[in-house]
């Protein structure tokens, strides 16, 4: 069963798949495409994963994997 802790890796991998940058909606679509079955069987996470992926992105920013939100264009998530 997937947990919100998996989302950090999923966001990172989705951004890699998108060429290192993507709009939030494209990251969500990529995660859904790659992890739909896991999300559907994840209990409450199924209802909160899009909110939780935003927190995962914040953790990636704080760990230096993603560019800070104030450096990237509005609505775009970018890897460093």
Image (cartoon, grey):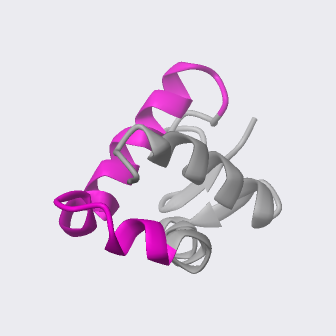
Range shown magenta: 36-65
Residue at (30, 50) in percent of width and height: 52
Q: Position of residue 63 (x, y in %)?
A: 57, 19
Vertical side of 28 occupied by 70: above or below: above
Q: Is residue 41 left or right of residue 44?
A: right
Residue placed furthest toward the right: 19
Q: Position of residue 13 (x, y in %)?
A: 69, 52
- Looking at the rendering, which quadrant does residue 64 occupy? top right
Residue at (57, 52) in percent of width and height: 10
Q: Position of residue 61 (x, y in %)?
A: 53, 30
- Looking at the rendering, which quadrant does residue 68 occupy? top right
Residue at (83, 62) in percent of width and height: 19
Predominant secondary structure, magenta span: helix
Q: Nearer the viewer, residue 77 or 47?
A: 47
Vertical side of 47 occupied by 73: above or below: above
Q: Nearer the viewer, residue 65 or 70?
A: 65
| Quarter of the N terminus within the rendering | bottom left
Residue 50 sits inside the magenta stretch: yes
- Looking at the rendering, which quadrant does residue 45 occupy? bottom left
| Quarter of the C terminus within the rendering | top right
Give the total number of marks visible in the rendering: 0
Residue at (34, 41) in percent of width and height: 55
Q: Nearer the viewer, residue 40 or 62?
A: 40
Residue placed furthest toward the top: 63
Q: Position of residue 24 (x, y in %)?
A: 49, 66
Vertical side of 62 occupied by 33: above or below: below
Q: Is residue 9 left or right of residue 38?
A: right
């Amino acid at each position: 069963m997937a947990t919100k802790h998996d989302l950090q890796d999923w966001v990172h991998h989705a951004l890699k798949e998108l060429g290192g940058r993507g709009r939030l909606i494209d990251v969500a679509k990529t995660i859904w495409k790659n992890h739909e079955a896991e999300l559907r069987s994840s209990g409450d996470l199924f209802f909160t994963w899009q909110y939780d992926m935003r927190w995962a992105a914040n953790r990636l920013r704080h760990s230096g994997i993603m560019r800070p939100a104030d450096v990237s264009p509005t609505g775009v998530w970018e890897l460093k």
